[in-house]
C-alpha cells in the first residue's frame, strides 16, 4: 500500500484504493474508491465528494437492495474520469 503523508490539496481528484493517508488534508476534492484497501490517520476530507466505481459501486447496490446505505447520495454515484493525482 502506498503511503501519502503530510499532503494538503484542494480541488483535485484522488484515487483512494491501495493508499494509506497520514496527516493529510484534502478540501473540496473528488475521492474515487473502487473497493481496495484504504486507510487514513489524522487526515481530513472537508467538503469532498465520494465517487464509487467498480466493485464498490456494485457492493453499494447490493447493500441498498437490502435496505442498508439508502441515504448514500441521491441515487447511484456515477463513475468519474480517471483520477489525476495520487495514483
Image: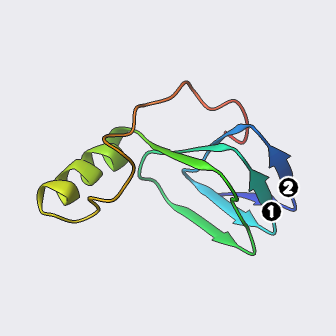
Q: Disc 2 on helix, strand or loop? A: loop
Based on the displayed image, in which of its 4 quarters is residue 81 positioned? top right
What is the quadrant of the N terminus in the image?
bottom right
Q: Residue at x 21, y 59 (%)?
A: 63
- In the rendered image, the residue lying farthest to the top is 81
Which residue is at the front of the view, 27 or 14? 27
- Asked whether disc 1 touches disc 2, contact meaning CB atoms under 8 Å apart, the reply is yes
Would you place residue 32 above or below residue 59 in this image?
A: above
Q: CA distance from mark 1 to mark 2?
A: 5 Å
Q: Residue at x 73, y 68 (%)?
A: 43
Q: Residue at x 35, y 49 (%)?
A: 56
Residue 24 numbered mark, or none? 1
Q: Earlier in the sequence, mark 1 or mark 2?
A: 2
Residue 58: percent from left, percent from top: 26, 45
Specify few, some or many for label 2: CA neighbours under 10 Å numbering under 14, 14-19, or 20 or more: few
- In the rendered image, the residue lying farthest to the left is 66
Which residue is at the front of the view, 69 or 3? 69
What is the quadrant of the C terminus in the image?
top right
Coloration of the structure image: rainbow
Would you place residue 44 above or below residue 9 in this image?
A: below
- In the rendered image, the residue lying farthest to the bottom is 42
Would you place residue 79 above or below residue 17 in this image?
A: above
Based on the displayed image, in which of its 4 quarters is residue 82 positioned? top right
Q: Which residue is mark 2?
A: 7
Residue 85 numbered mark, or none? none
Q: Disc 1 on helix, strand or loop? A: loop
Amino acid at each position: 500500500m502506498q503511503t501519502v503523508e503530510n499532503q494538503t490539496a484542494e480541488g483535485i481528484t484522488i484515487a483512494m484504493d491501495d493508499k494509506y493517508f497520514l496527516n493529510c488534508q484534502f478540501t473540496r476534492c473528488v475521492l474515487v474508491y473502487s473497493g481496495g484497501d484504504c486507510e487514513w490517520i489524522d487526515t481530513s476530507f472537508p467538503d469532498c465528494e465520494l465517487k464509487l466505481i467498480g466493485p464498490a459501486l456494485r457492493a453499494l447496490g447490493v447493500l441498498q437492495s437490502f435496505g442498508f446505505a439508502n441515504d448514500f447520495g441521491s441515487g447511484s454515484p456515477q463513475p468519474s474520469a480517471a483520477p489525476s493525482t495520487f495514483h
